[in-house]
Amino acid sequence: MRRSDMGDPMNEIPEVVIQRLPLYLRTLSALDAEGVTVVSSQDLGERLQVTPAQIRKDLSYFGRFGKQGRGYRVPDLIRELRLILGLGREWEMVLLGMGRLGWAVAGYPGFAQHGFKVVACFDADPQLIGKTAGPLVIQDISALAATIQQHGIQIGIVAVPAAAAQQVVDQLVACGVRGILNYAPTAPRVPPHVWVQNIDPAVALQAMTYHLSQRKPARRPAGRAPA
Amino acid sequence: MRRSDMGDPMNEIPEVVIQRLPLYLRTLSALDAEGVTVVSSQDLGERLQVTPAQIRKDLSYFGRFGKQGRGYRVPDLIRELRLILGLGREWEMVLLGMGRLGWAVAGYPGFAQHGFKVVACFDADPQLIGKTAGPLVIQDISALAATIQQHGIQIGIVAVPAAAAQQVVDQLVACGVRGILNYAPTAPRVPPHVWVQNIDPAVALQAMTYHLSQRKPARRPAGRAPA
């Protein structure tokens, strides 16, 4: 089914399309950093390992971008994608669990450049509470609700062990958080108004070993993104 | 199109199906740990936020599982999925980049339980080389090719800064690595016989903020997995 170029009044844009937009943005930002000002859907597709037709179709859900035969203006498409993805603002986040992974997440340099900011971090371990992680002081989890309310926070990052994840997620949801970035190796249950993105390297590896195990050496079909 | 229950002789199983199998396995393993021995596609779907029909269709690519009206035997389905995903063996991996993220990855407890093992780690910084990260000694990147050859390694983990990622990926590919788990916030280019899985929390967050930014409060449609 071909959708209208006027966007999608039914809000039925497939989730796989939404999930691809940040990848487009990431590649366009790399092109921009290289000084590239115009890119064809052919070139963009080659970088992303997606067909040019797929790119044009994905973008058509959100309006008209680029001109036939002229390619996309990189800064314009970046600006549009940032608006579509809700990146025209800063998103404050809380971080739960300050073990080794939590420390790495707290110091991750890739958040700030996209407007994401960890403003408070929490742990249940009395030995960690009060320690500083960069500019942050690790707080007792009992302070979570007040912090979320005070900052109007909508996103929580979960970096606790798997066994504690569901409980922590339930707390975040009870505090009004609507988006959860989950590093715990488990899929937490959430009500329908809450969005979860799971970061699980073992899951990513398992989809890879499927291909590595095929008798015939795996060859990605052209136009199919591997990741 | 309905596929045969005999599997897919054309090897045209959609990549999205492959990507879902590890999520099924993760949830089934959690059920197994809880002592659950049989699960209906209804219950499994509820946990995964996927429709029961989707689960049955995904599994039908690989043969017959479960009996109509009786549900799936959890240990059997776990064993089958592990075989399909190539998890009936140990996968040795090399880790490149021993900054804060590399240290967290080296100590990640979720690898071992699935048969993944980091057997060597590398950095280009002379100040890091020779230091120990758990049981591993950080090696100079110049030793990479010999290590990969000696162990017959097929998977490399990239935890270097974005600016160094493409070069490191090229080195891994030149050494014969066929699967790359990439933590650098960039999408490296690889030849068609190489599979990349990108772990990028900013990309995951951006797909989430799309939904959080919609004027109507986002509500996940039933049966659509958020992540």
Image (cartoon, coloured by chain):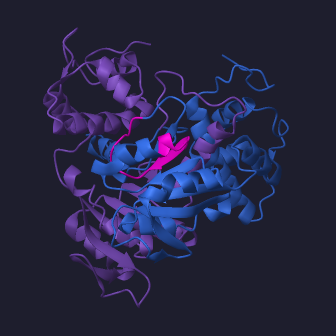
Chain colours: A blue, B purple
* Residue shown at the point (36%, 15%) measured from the top left: B3
Residue A183 in magenta stretch: yes
Image quarter hosting the N terminus of chain B: top left
> Does residue B8 appear anywhere in the picture?
no
Please state if B164 lies on the left or on the right of B81 as rendered: right
Please state if B185 lies on the left or on the right of B14 as rendered: right
Secondary structure predominantly adopted by residues drawn in magenta = loop
- State the image coordinates of residue B78 (x, y, percent, origin top left): 19, 34
Q: Looking at the image, which is closer to me, A60 or A67?
A: A60
- State the image coordinates of residue B146 (x, y, percent, origin top left): 27, 75
* Residue shown at the point (57%, 75%) measured from the top left: A135
Please state if B109 lies on the left or on the right of B3 as rendered: left
Q: Looking at the image, which is closer to me, A153 or A22?
A: A153
Res B125 → quadrant: bottom left
Residue B86 in magenta stretch: no
Which span of residues is magenta-colored?
A172-189
- State the image coordinates of residue A128 (x, y, percent, origin top left): 37, 72
* Residue shown at the point (46%, 61%) measured from the top left: B183
* Residue shown at the point (76%, 51%) measured from the top left: A88
> Does residue A206 appear anywhere in the picture?
yes
Please state if B86 lies on the left or on the right of B52 as rendered: left
